[in-house]
Amino acid sequence: MENKVQEDYKSEILEIIRGNASPGVLRGQLEDYHENDLADVFPELTVLERQKVCRVLDTDMLSDIFEHIDEREAAGYLNEMDIKKAASILSGMETDAVVDVLKMEPKEKRALLIELMDDDARKSVAVIASFDEEEIGSWMTTNCIVIRENLTAGQAMGSLVGQAQKNDNISTLFMVTDDHTFYGAMDLRDLLTAPPEAPLEDLIVTSYPYVYGHEAIDDCIEKLKDYSEDSIPVLDNSNRLLGVITSQSIVELVDDEMGEDYAKLAGLTAEEDLKEPLKESMKKRLPWLLILLVLGMLVSSVVGLFEGVVSQLPLIMCFQSLILDMAGNVGTQSLAVTIRVLMDESLTVRQKLELVWKEMRIAFSNGMILGVLSFTVIGLYIVFFKGKTFAFAYAVSGCIGLALVLAMLISGAVGTLIPLFFKKIHVDPAVASGPLITTINDLVAVVSYYGLSWIFLIEVMHLAG
């Protein structure tokens, strides 16, 4: 239903833009729509139609629209207009969004746009741009209300009114000392209900959470998720307030981190999007594929070592994929659980050992259930569809069931121990990706299955042929 409403809005907006209304009428009609709806229409417009819209709407509304547009597309649209107009639109956008858009521009164009932006916006962009992409400061905004801690409620209200013209994140107010050191925060409602002569000291929450701008995103993300505040202050190394990271940015940050981890679990070096060039996508996928090719060759060579087993008992080849697939599935499950648990930086050695033990017990228990089921069903399959005796059939299915239990048990341990090892040597545990775990577990499964088949079926029971 929501998609239908959005489509209706899109068709209405397109009809308005492509009509013959005068600029005054056109502006009034477009201002009735939300900025996000207008942003959705931009890709549907021709260059001339976008230029028409950008001439008609005021800069403030255009800034709001561009905040809802993907940074790569926004940079392209800005290139279609006069550079002063583009700088003016950027000046009205959230600082973190401006930084993202500027990254899409060539170096010379970026420098010119920054030079043409207003002084406050230029300073804010410079602060955020000074942080690396992996630092939490790169996600902050300077759109916040900052008030001295030694004022009365009435004086603070006056300061708020003056700043509210340029900053619309006013639900939480941040207090600083004379040298701009972060002091605490307070809710706007508390200020509105306080007597004008009341000192702010009585209203300020001095235990308010904060982060440092140069902290790594991975180190901050769990801390940020634990708080339900609208904004978390970001400080420099001298404890001065630089800006805030909003709840919306936190949601996007968590989503991005999950996307990156998912990409690594899939064997990619970084996350991809639909519009990414073919060459870039290949560069992200090829390194892991080359590593997995080498590991795959190792698995194949191990299978070759058991060529004698296969030649004497060809039937067991039918069930190789069953063992390999189940081992890979168990390893990937354990890997996903372990990576999620490792996001807690306070884990002790004891807790990590308990995690390994738990995953092995789960893998063993599931292996026993599936092993017994395989023993029963595969035995009947061999009897009725392969024409073998019950003794032969259940000897083979018993070996398969035992191999399944052993492969799943080892795979559960491998899927847990590998990310723990990566974490120990300070490498992102998500690098222990699903394909890597699956390939290692293939090796485990092959050795378990053919090794047991050789020992029990050929050497002990003499079932060759």
Image: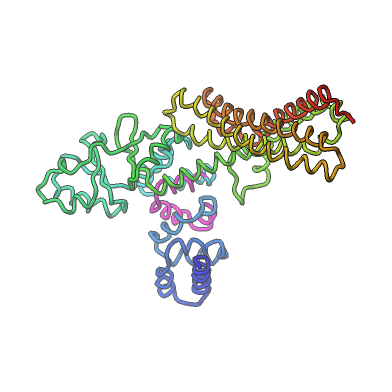
What percent of the width, then of the height, locates residue 318?
Answer: 81, 39
What percent of the width, then of the height, locates residue 104?
Answer: 53, 46
Instruction: Please name whichever residue, 314 or 12, is drawn nearer the observer in this view of the structure.
Output: 314
Q: Report the side of 258 relative to 283 (left or right).
A: left
- Residue furthest out toward the front: 390
- Residue furthest out toward the bottom: 20
Image-quadrant location for residue 446: top right
- Residue furthest out toward the right: 465
**Number of marks present in the image shown:** 0
What percent of the width, then of the height, locates residue 334?
Answer: 57, 34
Q: Residue at x 51, y 62 (%)?
A: 40
Instruction: Please name whichever residue, 70 or 121, is drawn nearer the observer in this view of the structure.
Output: 70
Please identify the dominant SS of the magenta region.
helix
Instruction: Please name whichever residue, 251 or 165, is drawn nearer the observer in this view of the structure.
Output: 251
Q: Residue at x 79, y 23 (%)?
A: 455
Quarter occupied by the C terminus: top right
Instruction: Please name whichever residue, 180 or 209, is drawn nearer the observer in this view of the structure.
Output: 209
Indicate the colouring scheme: rainbow
Tell whether position 99 is magenta. yes
Q: Residue at x 61, y 32 (%)?
A: 364
Image-quadrant location for residue 321: top right
What percent of the width, then of the height, locates residue 224?
Answer: 38, 40
- Residue furthest out toward the left: 197
Stretch in magenta: 75-103
Tell whether position 419 is magenta. no
